[in-house]
Image (spheres, rainbow, N blue to C red):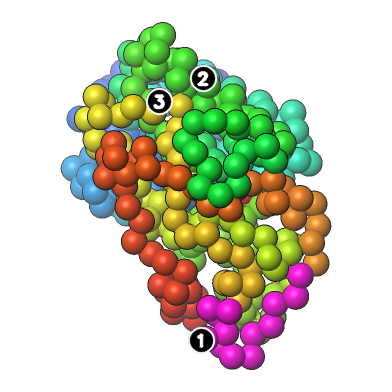
Amino acid sequence: MADAVKDGSANGHFELYLRLQSGMEKCMRTLLVTGAAGQIGSELTTALAHRFPAASILATDIRHPPEFPENVIFEHLDVRDADRMSLLVDAYGISTVYHMAALLSAVAEQLPEKAWDLNVNSLLNVLNLSKSGRVTQVFWPSSIAVFGPHTPRLKTPQHGVADPTTVYGISKWAGERWCAYYFNRFHVDVRSLRYPGIISWKTAPGGGTTDYAVEIFHQALENKRYDCFVDADVTLPMLYMPDAIAATLALMEVPSQAITVRSSYNLGGVSCSPSQIAAEIKKHLPGFALHCKPDFRDTIARSWPDSIDDAAARTDWGWKHRYGLSDITADMLEHLS
Ligand code: AKB
């Protein structure tokens, strides 16, 4: 595979055009992952490369890529650039897009208009590629951030009051409505999950409210204490990365007719607070101490559900999480140490 095209300049486009003409870059099946250097995108890219060894995976991001398996190609892509996205889709013969690029809740509060532009307009770019028939399947992550203070906090139902308070939540809620609209109006096969906080050890999260649930493990091992930016009792739904990846792959493989939710599926996992995570960590590291210094992210976290009713995902495509809090804690500490 030729070197990646460096940017979206006219020069870069021309190089790509030549490659397209030569037909050398056309693959039988190529999957595109945007945001492939991110916490979920990086692990999803690797999981797809292993799941489909005969396929090529086009990983894209504006950041430097991590190390990927051999059947992964990397290209620079700012997902707001519809022309370059379209060019890459044609050049590589992309059939499926996993559109993971986003600004997360905490950082989005500092850059509300950029967050809206990135999170919503880039989704429209992807949905329009599918509407035109060039891409046949799309995955797009939504979030528990679509819920807010007027949503039932316990066992939050699939359908009901959304009420997002953050620009991230508003963008995810709007994105969900766009997904349902493109499915109903244009038959775009778009599938989505409302991820809770994701705990993982390979790639650090960045800019989210739930990042504390990852930082706590790093700090426990490095400093034996963690200063948490949400209060000890704030309970949120969380999922371990292998479960999040398994859910994503499963949803994308289920026959289209089985999918009854075309906005985004609720996805539950473990519900836990910082003090409960700390208690689990103390079983392994007895000297660990949790200190809480709540900031604006505490207010965001308190507006989100404690737990999620994911019965629709369980019924429609057999979703079931595997990792409980004690499994997650043991696995995180083992890998990080
Ligand atoms: C965030 O905290 O912003 C994300 C999310 C829950 O979608 N991890």
Magenta region: which residues? 279-292
Mark 3, residue position: 262
Residue 152 lies in quadrant: top right
Q: Is residue 80 magenta?
A: no
Along the line of sight, the residue nearer the viewer: 3 or 230: 230
- The mark found on residue 284 in the picture is 1
Q: Position of residue 66 (x, y in %)?
A: 47, 55
Regarding residue 155, the answer to whether it shows in the image is yes
Left/right of residue 319 with respect to residue 294 in the rendered view: left
Mark 1, residues whose alpha carbon is within 10 Å: few (<14), some, or many (≥20)? few
Q: CA distance from mark 3 to mark 1?
A: 42 Å
Q: Amino acid at mark 1?
A: His
Q: Position of residue 276 (x, y in %)?
A: 58, 72
Q: Amino acid at mark 3?
A: Arg
Q: Position of residue 301 (x, y in %)?
A: 68, 51
Q: Amino acid at mark 2?
A: Trp
Above or below for 182 versus 266: above
Q: Is residue 282 magenta?
A: yes
Q: Name the residue rendered at 35%, 47% in the picture.
A: 247
Q: Name the residue rendered at 68%, 65% in the picture.
A: 233
